[in-house]
Image (cartoon, helix red, strand yellow):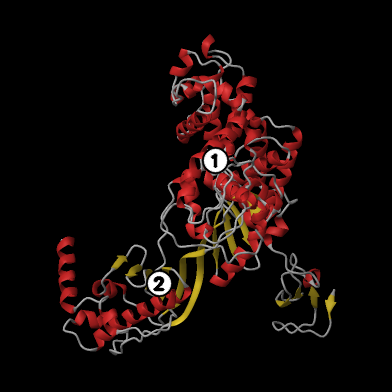
Amino acid sequence: MSRSGLSCPGCGSSNIVDDDLYCQAQLVCVDCGSVVSEGALTNESVYVGASDVSYSRTTAGDKKPCMNLLKGRHHVIAMCRILRVNREIEDLSQTFYSRAYQHKSFIRVTLRKKEFLAGCCVLVSCRMRQWPVTIGTISCLLDADLVEVGAVYKEMVTVLNIEAPSFNIYDVIEAHSQEYKISLHVAEELAENHKDLTKRAVELVELAADTWVVTGRQPVPVIMAAIYLSWQSLKPNRHRLKLSLDKFCQLAKVKKQKPAAIRVTEMKEVLCKLGKEIPWLGETLTPDNVVCQVEDILKHRYALLRRALRAREEALLPESLASCEASPPRAPEVSDPNPAESPVERRKRSAEGTLAPGDEAGQPRVAGELAGELAGGALESPDKGSNWGARALFAPPCVVHAKRRRVEQPELRDVTGDEEISDSEIDSYIRTPREAREFAQMQNMFLE
Amino acid sequence: MEPGNDDALDIIITNVVATFRVRCHLNLRTIALEGTNVIYKPEIGKVLMKLRKPKITASIWSSGKIICTGATSEDDAKLGARRLARVLQKLGFKAGMGTDDHSLSAGRKDRAGTGRIREVRFSAFKVVNVLAVCSMPFGIQLVDFTIKNRPIASYEPELHPAATYRIKHIKATVQVFSTGSITVTGPNVQNVATAVEQIYPLLFECRKPKALCK
């Protein structure tokens, strides 16, 4: 199509036509062939009104889920299969994993942390459906440190706002005792069935929980110690009694936990203290021969506990009578220990470890209540809270061997923070030039 | 025993952490050379200086920011911080008096080499963290406590023997042990005291006698 009004700059003719070269619009002179004008390479009208689109978006196909998310979900399923949990727990852990993965706290973390996250999702789902799994088991599956996995677990629970039930040691005992391979493939005198083993271990752990052995400790070594003692006591023959904890763990194909040996000693001590109260027992009990009496002790453990505590109160009573200034009539027999209702005393600075004499002096007290406090061992004020360990029959080691708190210096009480600071004080913190030179020389000598 | 009877409870402050600035660049090598009771850590880039009275350890960075730890009260921390600033001031002044050793004074001049001594000023003192311990006259059932106060309280016996209770609005964290001891960390002493007051009734609900754990 010719264009009017234009003349070719080369030959001057007005015979100019539109000649599109590919997409480019051009005006060409027919006579001499020179290009009069050319348009833009692209036809702009196509892009009018359209926004800029990035390369990745134009070339993207359908949005695929992240590869690591898929891998993580496979990990979750694998762990669920290893632990042999039911379908509900598997689905729940997958849901948690997908949710947590997308959250900003977990989307850009290392792959290792994402693996931990998978384990934690399994853990929290098991807890919510009352399936007993410990953090130790999960960290074993992940081949990781317990503390690291624990940190990820806490973060995940906060981020996803999950209310997971707490750890309950009794649920875990049964699951844990299944791991011990001592029902088959071992000698006759060493074999034991799991039901009896678990039942006795539960009783031992209950007793341990009552006597401050479980609180604040790692649960798995406590369970291991309970299982070992219950195995020994179910058939206390020569072979079983001879086998140490190490050999027992080797026999049962279980990895020994270091604190378990200490727990065994502590439990035996508790059993000895209770065994002393058995009326029909003639011999003195030592940690070596107490295992044979475990069955009786566990059968009557509550009665024995009461007797032991009462005996302790009676042993302490003369001490407290001697240290009291006032001497109100006291009931020699104690009815029921009532420590929870005892009032909190005003704190006194007293160096003696005995009951505070100043408390009783001049304060009318009900004899039964006082005796009840003695029984509970809760008479002492918070300052002497550390000493209740010395008096109580059962107490955790941190209380029995309490750290001595440094006494606050009285002169520091009057510090305001804005006092004058004398020059001489400050000079004591600065070396003289001579000292500094000598120090520098000595440093150089060492470096040579 | 009434809840809220906390004047019988002794809250012992064990550590106060405070930060302040001296508003000028510090030459750590010089401080390490001329100060007594200092430990220089070149790999981290700081100097640890210990004061005797009050018993405080300070981490001194070359940017002029200093962190003081080990004080037993807020005022103590302030006094210790001021003392520290005075020591640094004195180290700076010594160079100004014209000591024999040129390298010492050179280190103190600024890069322009005008010989102007940098002024050490004590500023931006702030108590950052206070750690206190308190002992309840009763033991505490941690599992019970956690169940009643979920999700503010969390307890994982496999990880830590204490239950952690975070009070968000006063930014305090309380760690509750079953023996009845609690440790409280907070941004200042007042918050710590408030935290103890707040948590006492919750602990009282879940108490157990110390002699017997039943």
Is any part of residue A111 visible from this angle? no
The residue to which callout 1 is attached is A212
- Labels 1, 2: one chain: yes
Under mark 2, the amino acid is Pro
Image coordinates of residue A201 in percent, x first then y, are 59, 27
Label 1 crowding class (10 Å Cα cut-off): few <14, some 14-19, many 20+?
Answer: many
Residue B192 placement: quadrant? bottom right
Q: Position of residue B156 (x, y in %)?
A: 60, 46
Q: CA distance from mark 1 to mark 2?
A: 37 Å
Callout 1 touching callout 2 (CB < 8 Å): no
* In this rendering, position of residue A111 left or right of residue A402: right
Nearer the observer, A79 or B199: B199
Q: Residue at x 19, y 74 (%)?
A: A436
Q: Residue at x 34, y 73 (%)?
A: B53
Q: Residues within 10 Å of mark 2 (few under 14, many from 20)?
A: few
Pick the front one: B176 or B84? B176
Instruction: Tell me where residue A240 appears, x and y as whole percent.
Output: 48, 16
A165 sits left or right of A421 in the view = right
On screen, residue B70 versus residue B138, left or right, reads: left
Element under disc 2: helix
Q: Which residue is labeled 2 in the image?
A: A410
Q: Position of residue A150 (x, y in %)?
A: 57, 47
Q: Nearer the viewer, residue B55 or A268?
A: A268
Q: Residue at x 58, y 61 (%)?
A: B173
The mark nearer the N terminus, 1 or 2, is 1
Q: Residue at x 28, y 89 (%)?
A: B115
User: Which chain letter matches label 1?
Assistant: A
| Residue furthest top as drawn | A188
For discs 1 and 2, the disc positioned in front in the rendered view:
2
Q: Quadrant of residue A161?
A: bottom right
Residue A58 drawn above or below residue A270 = below
Judge whether A132 appears above or below A319 on screen: above
